[in-house]
Image (cartoon, grey):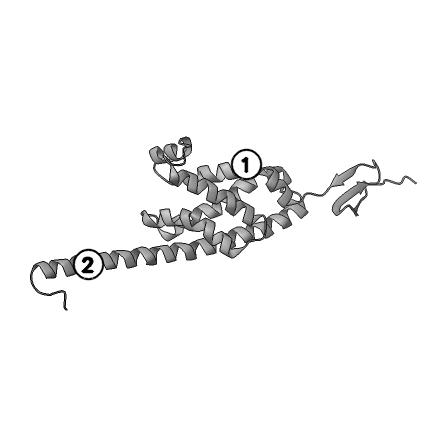
Amino acid sequence: MRLFIKHFLIDFFDKGEVFKINFISGKKYNKMNIQKELIKKKKTLVHQWFKAVINTYASDTAQFLESQKDLFANPVGNTILNGLTMLFDEMTGSMDKEKIVEFLDPIIRVRAVQTFAPSKAVAFLYTLKVIIRDNFKGSLKDKTFVKELLELELNIDRLALIGFDVYMECRESLNSIRANQEKKKVYKAFKRAGLITDSQ
């Protein structure tokens, strides 16, 4: 009787790392950890994310934001890039809400001042899901990787929800400023017309 033995894999721990041993070949396989893989590709992933964000602007603006590296000549582009870099670290790390708000606020504030609808103002956060999946297509058949990926995507969803809250706060602040400006205009107009005095 012939006995066919398939490759047999077993997990074991070595210095805090999880490995697989193939008992046929004796080869040691390191199980993929998505956080470590993302950190390895951080520069590439953040750059692609940055391009996705600036491409939501007009083409000439996007070109300037990407090409102009001077901090003083291009404060918006530098603010976006630095913010995305810090957000990436939080997404793969502790997900500290206070830090996330701190890094999101300057990016969202710029978009709140412009004509972006709420959904479009925060949509750039979801594009990171697509970017990560595109960069790890070969790992999507790995069940462990997919499980970790889904957990990571929940963090991206949390970023987006926080981003929406930040956007709404920025819009409320802008609306309050505009309302106060209008009040001042009306007051000055009434004063010039002699309808009110300073004592009033």
Count of number-bearing discs: 2
Quarter in which the C terminus is drawn:
bottom left
User: Residue 137: x, y in percent?
Assistant: 59, 38
User: Residue 76: x, y in percent?
Assistant: 38, 40
| Image vertical order of residue 100 relative to residue 50, above or below | below
Residue located farthest toward the right when viewing the structure as drawn: 1
User: Residue 109: x, y in percent?
Assistant: 37, 50
**Quick one: SS at disc 2?**
helix
Q: Is residue 185 visible?
A: yes
Query: Is 191 situated left or right of 7 in this image?
Result: left
Looking at the image, is mark 2 or mark 1 earlier in the sequence? 1
What's the CA distance linking mark 2 and mark 1?
A: 48 Å
Residue located farthest toward the top when viewing the structure as drawn: 67
| Image vertical order of residue 94 relative to residue 51, above or below | below
What amino acid is found at the position of numbered circle 1 in the picture?
Answer: Lys
Which mark is on residue 184?
A: 2
Mark 1 lies on residue: 43
**Quick one: SS at disc 1?**
helix
Which mark is on residue 100?
A: none
Query: Is 54 situated left or right of 47 in this image?
Result: left
Residue located farthest toward the left when viewing the structure as drawn: 194
Instruction: Name which residue lies at 56% across and 42% down.
Output: 133
User: Residue 152: x, y in percent?
Assistant: 58, 50
